[in-house]
Image: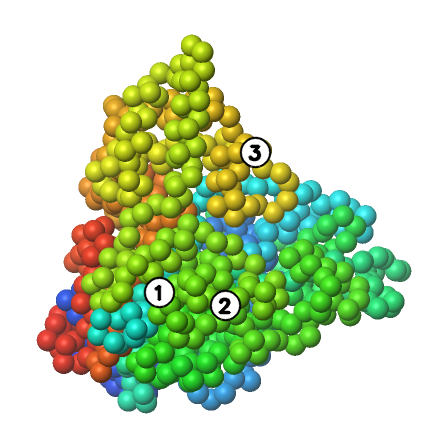
Amino acid sequence: MRKLPTFLLLLAAGEASAQAFTPTEVARWQQQARRISIVRDTWGVPHITGKTDADAVFGLLYTQCEDDFARVEDNYLTALGRQAEVKGEEALYEDLRQRLFLDSARAVGIYQRSPRWMKDLLHAFADGTNYYLATHPTVRPRLLHRFQPWMPLLFSEGSIGGNVSVVPLERLKAFYSQPKKTSWQAPFPQADPRHADDEPVGSNGFAIGASKSASGHPLLLINPHTSFYFRSEVQMTSAAGLNAYGAVTWGQFFIYQGFNEKCGWMHTSSQADSMDEYLETVTQQDGKYVYQYDGQQLPLATDTLSLVYLKDGQRRRRPFTTYHTPHGPVVGQQGDKWVTVKMMNMPLEALEQSYLRTKAHDYASFQEVMRLNGNASNNTVFADNTGTIAYWHGNFMPRRPAGYDYSQPVDGSTKATEWQGLHKVEELVQVKNPASGFIQNCNSTPYTVAGPASPAKGQYPTYMAPDAENYRGINAVRVLSRQQAFTLDTLVVAANDPHLAGFEQLLPSLLHDCQLLLDEPGGTLPPGVEAALPVLRAWNLSYSKTSTAQTLATYWAERMQRLARPRLPTGPPPDFISFINFIIEHTTPEEKATALAETIAELKRDFGSWQVPWGEVNRYQRLTGNINETFDDKQPSRPVAFTSSAWGSLAAFGARTYPGTKKRYGGVGNSFVAVVEFGPRVVARSVVTGGQASRPDSPHFLDQAPLYCEGQFKDVLFYPEDVAQHAARTYYPGE
């Protein structure tokens, strides 16, 4: 192993003019780097060991930058509200939304008040990232040439969609792009038809108790559904007691979904109501805005933000005057009321919780970390080696006064609607060691989380769990109920169960209505439909690469969604099961049959026949490793059997066509997937989408694609002796 001489480090720093680092900084980083060992195993997974937790964080960020610096930087451009500086004017209101809730000045203040142990980790984050830039002068950041220790406080939990992302951009833009009048009518935000059929993101988490485990040891399935390559696989260890393995969101320094020697945790996106909208009564007095509160007229807080954006190759600025009440920032208008949003605003606690959970060792210590109340967007599925399995629905949960519908904006002019503190962890919807022996959550209601042993809905406020059931949840309960003695192998089989519950009512409605048309006097069907019906009738509703019925049913069902969506009544969009029922009830037999005929014609046009195996159209392809991947029907790709989670596919593969393609290519769904058994020694298997590296010239760019596309897993190398036996490269940062 060859050391990188100090003079080369200084040269590297000097060549990157905007990211120049001082000789003192580089020398300090180099000294810390020598305390860190990085072992890349034969899959390219980094196993990072340091004397302190801060050493492990330094090594983690260094390896993340090695694997995909572009995604590290991109996540912080989002967190900082600076995407418009590289993407242009189209990202301006995303930046505004981000900065309304937390900006860099406040993050610096929180950093300064952080405890010493957290400051050590924050500095290690910045140092590991900056040391990578110092030792890689050919890497050209788009904007961020130096990372600061306060930055992770803007990006404190690893979910694919934090709370801020649910604030509607259309309403925000309508408000902040118009002159303000208290009587101004904001346009009602319209659904964007381009995104109406976007694949849902979320996750599956299963926990198997001792009573349903063949070995008597608890098992855990970790199965996040995200945009592909959203997280990387890593192991972090230190002499200070850190030993965590799992998935890390690019640019963060904690294992977001994973396990240690004693326990494991899986987060699923939640609809638990952790934020509220308030209707503020705003008027003008002497040319200034005031808002009404408990009979008083109080001055409305204002601020001026000057956002930079790129246009025609030039950096330009646009000023915004923003408004706040104690509830939160103004994000839009409804009638003559201004809308504010109140949400969790505890970045330090969120970051502390995200990190400290990785060092929990049992149910009690894990629950103690949850008392920080720093997780606002996720549920948690848990298992430990003492035999405990558990589930919590949400975490940060405001206590609301009775008598108000908090699923809608509430009156902001009275203290009667104010939060009354937070619910204790013990008050959340939860279950521990259910009699059913299993726990599942698939972004669905917690009231089926353990089958017949689930929590009772009537015991909790509605706002705690407004989540609807979905087809994955239905399938998960069915799969986990019927198996009596799970092993890692059979848990993998359960995670890949091919049944598509979403077609259980929808497809029979088509067959029934086509028969009605045939039974009419002189009844006929559109061209090609009658020949296709036996194929659909014989389908077992399971995904398969060879299934022609799956192709036909999927394309037809998507066409029916497009037909029915404009007919939905105004108001909040329905959950997917309700939408499918709406399609069945609000389309005619003629429309169903015509849609099938049009589907047959589409498949013939694009593929030469309507009898197309699903694996021929549903493909995995990775060509560039760029954040925005490109796809090409003429380039190599792999068939994939599993499909959209919307139809109940537990293994999720959300695919669509792209410009110039007839085939559909996956971009969201299964990402990092793992199964873990908590016995005397942890045994685990995992797979990631494609591979660990983002560079096409790396042997780890596509080495896991065959496993991934077949629903297979590799052995996790958790213990030092196993890592050493399969070590492909051992080095320290900068070497």
Residue at position x 14%, y 77% from top?
Answer: 722
Q: Are marks 2 and 3 in contact (CB under 8 Å)?
A: no
Q: Which residue is mark 2?
A: 455
Return the mark for residue 566.
Answer: 3
**Residue 108 drawn at (x, y percent):** 55, 77
Tag 3: amino acid: Pro
Residue at position x 18%, y 81% from top?
Answer: 720
**How far is the residue under mark 2 from the one under mark 3?**
36 Å
Q: Earlier in the sequence, mark 3 or mark 1?
A: 1
**Secondary structure found at label 1:** strand
Picture colour scheme: rainbow
Front one among 136 and 481: 481
Q: Residues within 10 Å of mark 1 (few under 14, many from 20)?
A: many
Residue at position x 54%, y 83% from top?
Answer: 112
Front one among 8 and 400: 400
**Secondary structure found at label 3:** helix
**Residue 52 drawn at (x, y percent):** 32, 87
The answer to whether 552 appears left or right of 441 in the picture is left
Quarter holding the C terminus is bottom left
Q: Earlier in the sequence, mark 1 or mark 2?
A: 1
> Residue 80: in sight, yes or no?
no
Q: Which residue is mark 1?
A: 206
